[in-house]
Image: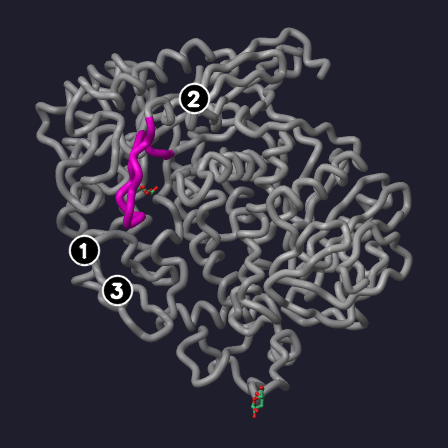
Amino acid sequence: MIVYGGDWNPEQWPEEVWSEDVALMREAGVNRVSLGIFSWSWLEPVEGAFEFGWLDRCMDLLAENGIQACLATPTAAPPPWFAHTYPEALPQDADGRTFTHGSRQAFCPSSPIYRDRALRIAEQVARRYKDHPALTIWHIHNEYGCHNARCHCDTSAEAFRAWLCERYQSLDALNEAWGTAFWSQRYGDWAQILPPRATPAIGNPAQLLDFRRFSSDALLDLYRAERDLLAAIAPGVPATTNLMAGMHWEMDYWRFAEELDVVASDHYLNGDEPHIQLAFSADLARSLNKGRPWILMEHSTSAVNWQGHNPAKAPRELLRNSVQHLARGADAIMFFQWRASREGAEKWHSGMLPHAGTDTKIWREVVELGAALRDLADVEGSTVGADVAILMDYASIWAQDHPAQPTAHHKPIEIIRQWYGELWRLGVTCDVRHPEDDLSGYRLVVVPALYLVSDAGAARLRRFVEGGGIAVAGPYSGIVDDNDRVRLGGYPGAWRDLLGVRVEEFFPRESVELTSGRKGWVWSELAHATTAEVLDTYVTGEPAWTRNAWGAGAAHYLTTLPRGADLRAVLAEVCADASVPTADAEGLELVRRSHPDGRSYLFAINHGDTEATGGGVTVPAGEFRVARLESASQ
Ligand code: GLA
Ligand code: GLA
């Protein structure tokens, strides 16, 4: 089956509402709900005193109605007693401002008190429900790092020092890695090291980068601790937590994904062309789960409440969004949340069951979606194949967050989205990969913006091209090592040989005209083709686009950033070089999922306002179709 459901927050409603909830869930075809996510103060109203009666009744109700429970540990929302009793466990920002309770995630990730109390309530939940027939999967915590990704308090400082000690072993190694010869920052004692806090001038970039790594690890460590505890009490019950793939960049999701039994991710529409950002998020979630089917743990039926201006979804958009996620490998389509809240900070956030009740656009579409997913039950377990991988690493993005850069306008996330967007328009399905992953099996590897790459990562791409692959890199990629130290001898130091190009100087500027008539934006460079062929130049003559034959493959390089149709044209030629088929996919999104036995599904989603045909399928405006194909020959 395809899992269908959402967050159920019964504690927000009187008990008589619960049976109506469950009856309506059945009407909509809901077969799983997440619950208990923010229930800590209702499960442990007084420290050490537990009240499970209400949750027992909810779990029983689910079991009686054949609805699975994705049961949470409530550790993302410590109760008021926690902050009141242990103010030292609250998180602090770089300016020393302490946050308190009254919303959620008010805890220092490195606090031993938080850890202890979180594990205690998680243990209670696990012991109580380990054999409950509704229990299907653990939902540990909620969106790690969404609100407290980096804590700069003294407890965090202590933990940061321990993390550094483990990483570098000696102060000499740390001084070397952090480049502390610069501005007299040489450390003579571990105790002198602090998290980045307010400083008179620009802070040390390597310190900042390591602090981002440490902060991500601190939360990952909490995940591991909860997971191990649950696994010991309830062996065999899978565990996950909801990531925010493509939306949140504070946690190293490559490292998180390694620890999840199955990747779960949340997505909310945002920005321009939100359906393309949705596709990126889904492709990243699938890639984090190594290509296996993943769980869409949350998305919205209509408006959210946190964007200042919150557009409601157009008719059918809920269905298109859901099917897009399904097409890109999700085997579970879930929403935040089941019943829209009537109170609290999220009362203006849409739900599956709106304030206005069942005689609504949202409810009718929720019921229709449930039926559609039931019809597509055999899609479960099928996978999405991709010829193209986009390289993305969190550490590289974090390193570029340091404020002193050649230009603030070279924004890696934006560039990755632009390149992804043009590949989407070309109808190319992409995986996203960590630079150190094995890349064999792809035809094309795309490196839109990867400022920082490790030696191992640099070698991977070289080996991929050597073996016959085609690569394309954007400017300001391959520039620094793991510790944000410049790779010398001409940029980009990591790939000068592979690209056959040597760059002597960056010339950031608003835009630059190219001989081809195309335009580059934001960035330009004084580059020399050493062994590469020059495919396009600035009107002033310097290389803008190069191609270097390397081993059995070739590596393209752009010294500037084309956009829109110009970028699409370049990527189309690069795809042709890699024998990756392209199509004009504007409007009609086509994605294929296949089973190993040859059964496959062509998902066609029409985002435009006129009928569209592609892959032999005709789809009315705003609709979707799923064609079942018997042979996976394409
Ligand atoms: C000042 C400082 C130098 C250096 C430059 C950078 O002049 O004295 O140390 O930071 O700014 O522009
Ligand atoms: C996140 C959280 C949910 C809710 C939604 C609102 O995904 O996990 O609890 O706050 O955002 O969009």
Sequence-wise first label, 1 or 2: 1
Q: Which amino acid, by three-letter code, is at mark 3?
A: Phe
Contact check, label 1 and label 2, Cβ < 8 Å: no
- Asked whether mark 1 and ligand 2 are closer than 8 Å, the reply comes as no
State the residue in front, 87 or 340: 340
Magenta segment = 298-314
SS for callout 3: loop
Q: Residues within 10 Å of mark 2 (few under 14, many from 20)?
A: many
Placement of the C terminus among the 4 image quadrants: top right
- When the figure is inspected, residue 342 is found, relative to residue 16, above or below; the finding is below
Q: How many marks?
A: 3
State the residue in front, 227 or 440: 440
Sequence-wise first label, 2 or 3: 3
- At a point 47% along the width and 28% down the height, the residue shown is 325
- At a point 31% along the width and 29% down the height, the residue shown is 301
167 with respect to 317 (left or right): right
Q: Which residue is mark 2?
A: 622
- At a point 45% along the width and 29% down the height, the residue shown is 236
- At a point 37% along the width and 51% down the height, the residue shown is 146
Q: Which residue is mark 3?
A: 99
Callout in the foreground (2, 3)? 2
Question: What type of secondary structure mainly makes up the magenta span?
Answer: loop
553 with respect to 401 (left or right): right
SS for callout 2: loop
Q: Which mark is residue 503?
A: none
Q: Which mark is residue 102?
A: 1
Residue 482, image x, y percentages: 65, 64
Q: Which amino acid, by three-letter code, is at mark 1?
A: Gly
For residue 57, which quarter of the picture?
top left
Q: Residues within 10 Å of mark 3 (few under 14, many from 20)?
A: some
Residue 539, image x, y percentages: 76, 60
